[in-house]
Amino acid sequence: MKLPLALLGLSAAQNAWHVSAVPLSTWSTNSGASPHAVDMFNTAIEWNDKYWDDQAGYLITSTSGSGRYDTRHSAWYATQLLARNAPGDVAKAVRIFDNVIAGQYLDPSKQWYGDYQHAPSEPEPGTLKYPDDGPYSSWDPNIRDFVGCAWIVALADYGHLLPAATVSKVENSLHIAAKGDLYRVGGVDGDNSYPCYSNPWIMRTILQNWVGARVGDANLTKSGENFAQEIYDLWSMHRTLSEFNSPTYAGVAMWALALWNQYGTSGSRLQKFGPEMLTASWNELAQLYNANLKNLAGPWDRTYGYDMKQYASLVGAVIWGVVGRDQAPVPQQELGMYHQDDFAFYPLFALAMPSMVKYLPAKAKANLLKFPGEHFFTSKAYSPPFDTYPRNITAWVSENVTIGAETVAETVVGGPSINPSQFSPAVIQWAMDDNQIGCIAHWVTQSSIDAVAAPGSLKISYPNATADNGPVSFNLLFSGLDLANGLNVTGLEGLPGLDLEISTNALPNYTITYDTDHSVNEFVFYNVTYTMPEAFAGTPYISLRVV
Ligand SMILES: *[C@@H]1O[C@H](CO)[C@@H](O)[C@H](O)[C@H]1NC(C)=O
Ligand SMILES: *[C@@H]1O[C@H](CO)[C@@H](O)[C@H](O)[C@H]1NC(C)=O
Ligand SMILES: *[C@@H]1O[C@H](CO)[C@@H](O)[C@H](O)[C@H]1NC(C)=O
Ligand SMILES: *[C@@H]1O[C@H](CO)[C@@H](O)[C@H](O)[C@H]1NC(C)=O
Ligand SMILES: *[C@@H]1O[C@H](CO)[C@@H](O)[C@H](O)[C@H]1NC(C)=O
Ligand SMILES: *[C@@H]1O[C@H](CO)[C@@H](O)[C@H](O)[C@H]1NC(C)=O
Ligand SMILES: *[C@@H]1O[C@H](CO)[C@@H](O)[C@H](O)[C@H]1NC(C)=O
């Protein structure tokens, strides 16, 4: 049945772009974007459209957040609206710029100077009712970078669509954001901005470089050059980013490197180093990606889940842009995605695709489409000041099973982001059947872990075990059995599709719980825990071998 437009709440003008090819005739035809990138852009911006509250002039938050509306998503959406440029889009974008900028923190004496709110309902940070417990409490220092980078794209590519007053307003706001970003010094006042914090560091570098040139602030330009050199020096040690192989943040890093290449000033170090770093990122991705399982093999320095087909990740967006949604490690439907928040970012990845694929080697592209055959990967990554030595990375990538691991001795438990739910230094993934991906992820409780992958095996040991966080134990989280069909999971041995044999010097009577109170990143799992005897000699270890 065809409903009258009025019943659908659409004016004729609004409906026009919905059914016509208008979205395709704006950014995409000019940029040479592939049909896959165009599809990603349209799919994800239409998802964002559904969160738009026209009365407020913001996107409603797609997760429980700091308030009803989401400032960062709205800021991203402004750029996307300009790129689509359908009737009414530019006017909406102008409203968003006005709204988001009205919530920028302007007191230069505060650590959050130049930052943007999480949500427009938030009170001032650092007050009694909204205490400042450092970065990532009542304020998030990275929002400067996420908003700033999206708005670089808005001004550079679509500034001509905006009234002059809006252009200068956005420029001025970015100038303040960039100046505030320079307040960040790793280790000072609780700040964690080090070159090893790869994704925001790469974003801050282009923010400084681009804004410096745009407003003529030489100190910003110089800071951009210094930041580019600092991360390049660290990256060059092993040709890896410190936030190694993170299904979400490796995507952010690639996006931001594409911005270095596309928007970095000519003759800058961004333009000098960007192509090499982006090319290496593609090659690494192509080695660790398994196109059969549609997942990245471990280890994951920072992850938001255990199966990329179930949650929205930004490496997923990068691959979608190359191979199309059907073949990409992304959820195939929008409702029910885990970590759905990041879907709001996808259209910006689509816009960057032409610049990203410029440095995609043909062989790497082939691996994203078709698994190239069993191989073994080794590398290192280093995260000073957290690592006491560069982490050794090993990954066995086979047709239906991947095993990835890293040795690590850090000053903290849970990786530099001090978050065990993100840090997965030892992971096994496999095809349980034609549809389900099983995952066993090691849950960290120690700061020193030797996890080493070999063909068909994973060995985890604790060279410097402490009982500081409870009894010394190996916590292995098994997830992915969404259709158990009556199967009783009794341990790590006897799981579907993977015949494992366990050997360990821990007590043989492991515990197993299906713990719905403690899902990790929305994934529910079986928690199989092996505990060491109270008094033990030697180094605790557990070894998992595929037989
Ligand atoms: C210039 O940039 C540096 C960081 O690169 C910062 O420490 C310094 O405060 C800045 N100076 C001014 C005047 O903003
Ligand atoms: C890391 O790998 C190097 C060789 O590449 C080796 O010498 C070193 O012992 C390894 N470290 C650990 C902790 O496994
Ligand atoms: C991988 O899985 C496919 C599909 O289930 C199967 O046909 C193939 O034999 C498996 N390969 C190996 C090496 O087990
Ligand atoms: C081993 O643990 C002790 C006590 O927790 C700590 O002081 C020391 O730095 C650790 N050594 C290494 C190599 O991590
Ligand atoms: C699983 O366990 C239940 C309860 O112990 C038992 O009744 C059932 O037969 C078991 N299923 C299988 C497939 O072993
Ligand atoms: C496992 O066995 C040890 C020693 O036999 C015992 O002390 C411990 O309570 C047992 N743990 C569980 C979970 O049954
Ligand atoms: C897994 O179970 C162990 C033992 O009960 C517990 O100490 C640990 O916190 C659990 N891990 C997670 C992630 O729930």
Image (tube, grey):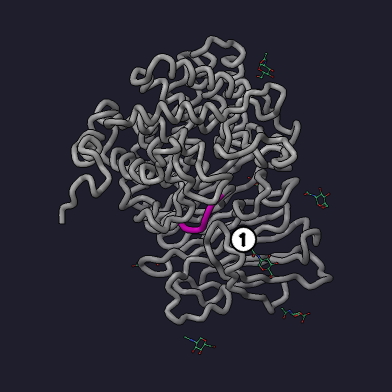
For this rendering, which residue is in front, 337 or 165?
Answer: 165
Q: Quadrant of the N terminus?
A: bottom left
Picture layout, residue 18 above or below residue 473? above
Q: Quadrant of residue 462?
A: bottom right
Q: Is residue 191 in view?
A: yes
Q: Quadrant of residue 445?
A: bottom right
Q: Is residue 359 in view?
A: no
Residue at image position (31%, 31%) is 88
Q: What's the magenta bit mostly, secondary-structure-wise?
A: loop
Residue 299 position in % (x across, y down): 56, 52
Residue 456 position in % (x across, y down): 52, 63
Residue tagged 1: 442
Q: Tell me where the magenta segment starts and ends, as one range.
A: 303-307
For this rendering, which residue is in front, 175 or 429?
Answer: 175
Magenta-colored stretch includes residue 396: no
Q: Secondary structure at mark 1?
A: strand
For this rendering, which residue is in front, 401 or 447?
Answer: 447
Residue 444 position in % (x across, y down): 67, 57
Residue 386 position in % (x across, y down): 71, 41
Magenta-colored stretch includes residue 305: yes
Residue at image position (47%, 39%) is 73
Q: Amino acid at mark 1?
A: His
Query: From the viewer's perspective, is 192 left or right of 433?
Result: right
